Image: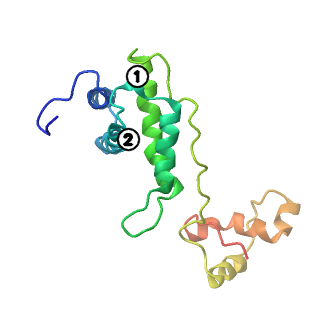
Amino acid sequence: MSAAAAPEPGSLTAEMVRFCQYLASRNYSPFTIEQRTRAISAFIAWAAVRGVERPQDVTLPILERYQQHLFHHRKADGEPLTFRTQIVRLVPLRAFFKWLVRERVILFNPAADLELPRGEKRLPATILSTDEVEAVMALPVSRHTAGPARSRHPRSALCDRRAAFGGHAAARV
């Protein structure tokens, strides 16, 4: 298939094109459609090398092998893909195969039982410095606290004073 030729009817690529048209008709943003297209296209390219070119040929074990491929894949700098990136590449596949079932292209969703990696738990991008925490603690206690027990606890002061620093939570000290 050349780049200018239409995809073979019934192929993963042809169904992806239909899926993206469906997303556009449902008013998904162009960014979302582009991200899903990239994720699904990457899977289609990976699957084609393995001889899988039709939606009916995709099984849960194939999707799990693709997931392992993502886990072992290294970027140009030698770093692995983050778990968040792996999730971003797998979630569109789940939506795509769910849509294929709804459209009666396939009888069952091979991605229905695909277990996604656990998301990473990251610290907030902005954490108050020690000086900022001390400044928050020095602020007067609000008269609108939730009661005497709460207002006596040092962390309650942080909860009551978040707005003083644009809603950012203070770092745990």
Distance of label 2 from label 1 (alpha carbons): 15 Å
- The residue lying at 57 percent from left, 71 percent from top is 165
Q: Quadrant of residue 35?
A: top left
Residue shown at 30%/43% (left/top)? Answer: 34
| Residue 145 shows up from this direction | yes
Residue 173 lies in what quarter of the image? Answer: bottom right
Which of the marked residues, 2 or 1, is nearer the chain's N terminus? 2
Provide the residue designation for mark 1: 56
- Seen in the picture, residue 135 relative to 35 is either above or below; the reply is below
Vertical side of 94 occupied by 89: above or below = below
For disc 2, the neighbor class at 10 Å (few under 14, some 14 to 19, many from 20) is some
Residue 130 percent across, percent down from the top left: 66, 83
Question: SS class of the residue under badge 2?
Answer: helix
Tell me what residue is drawn at x 59 percent, y 52 percent.
Answer: 119
Q: Amino acid at mark 1?
A: Gln
- Residue in the foreground of this view, choosing between 122 and 47: 47
The residue that mark 2 highlights is 43
